[in-house]
Image (tube, rainbow, N blue to C red):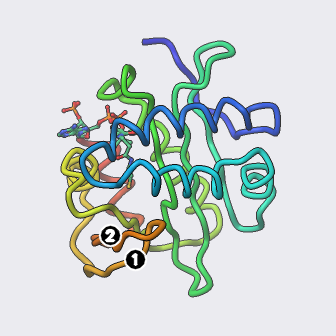
Amino acid sequence: MDYSIRPATSADVPAIGQVARETWRVTYAQTIAPHNQQRVLERAYTDAALAAALGAPHSWFFVAVDGQQVLGFAQFLRRGDGQGELARIYVLPAYQRQGIGRALLQAGVNAMAREGIHRCYVSVEVDNAPAIAFYQHFGFRYHRVYASFVGDQLVQLLELKTALRALRHALETR
Ligand SMILES: CC(C)(COP(=O)(O)OP(=O)(O)OC[C@H]1O[C@@H](n2cnc3c(N)ncnc32)[C@H](O)[C@@H]1OP(=O)(O)O)[C@@H](O)C(=O)NCCC(=O)NCCS
């Protein structure tokens, strides 16, 4: 699999939206009602919303590309409390399980470490077993469970955390 990771640019915005729509449909087919998926996608993945996310301060937005094709993306943030957060990570279904998620995570860890961030959090829908397995593989551990609305649906979210140093070590050794 030939791909590279680079910071996203405004030219990537339409492709990121496409990746999100395709990956959301498959990922949340059993858990988030289509009209609620639609609502989030219409809010967070419009060209304007993505352009704003790309330009947000203390935020790092990466894409995995094969030539012109965007295969996946991830956004990392520095939260108000100074900790890091993996805000979103999506790899097209056909390209999952080929190391792209790992490479996106590595890019985010490098960026957060340069900002002096020591800990990284991520929230994942409680029934999203593949994503939970991905995070656990790299050493993320339980932090808390909370509920949040996705459209008109209350969704249970699992928040995981890891020390950035442990995450770097896991990325080097696992
Ligand atoms: C979760 C996701 C980002 C992982 O990216 P990926 O490119 O598929 O993952 P990688 O190939 O880098 O996997 C690295 C390791 O994580 C673990 N892992 C990844 N996907 C897994 C799965 N479906 N089941 C079990 N373990 C998994 C494995 O240990 C894997 O190593 P291995 O393939 O050598 O066994 C990707 O599958 C995805 O986009 N899923 C749908 C969207 C989603 O759920 N996003 C997260 C929302 S919070």
Label 1: which secondary element: strand
Using a 10 Å C-alpha cutoff, classify the residue at mark 2 as few (fewer than 14 neighbours), some (14 to 19) or many (20 or more): some
Point out the tag, 2 or 1, that comes first from the N-terminus. 1
Using a 10 Å C-alpha cutoff, classify the residue at mark 1 as few (fewer than 14 neighbours), some (14 to 19) or many (20 or more): few
Callout 2, which amino acid?
A: Val
Q: Which residue is drawn at 37% across and 27% down?
A: 93
- The one of 169 and 42 positioned closer to us in this rendering: 42
Q: Is residue 139 left or right of residue 18?
A: left
How far apart in space, not on screen, are marks 2 and 1 (Cα)?
A: 5 Å
- Residue 144: percent from left, percent from top: 26, 81
- Residue 140: percent from left, percent from top: 27, 63
- Residue 14: percent from left, percent from top: 72, 33
Q: Which residue is drawn at 82% across and 39% down?
A: 10
Quarter location, residue 67: top right
- The one of 158 and 117 positioned closer to us in this rendering: 158
Residue on which disc 1 sits: 148
Residue on which disc 2 sits: 155
Q: Do the residues labelled 2 and 1 touch (CB within 8 Å)?
A: yes
Q: In which quarter of the image is ligand 1?
A: top left
- Residue 138: percent from left, percent from top: 27, 52
- The one of 11 and 20 positioned closer to us in this rendering: 20
Quarter occupied by the C terminus: top left
Distance from mark 2 CB to nearest ligand 1 atom below 8 Å: no
The relative height of residue 42 versus residue 90 in the rendered view (above or below) is below
Callout 1, which amino acid?
A: Ser
Q: Residue at x 58, y 53 (%)?
A: 75
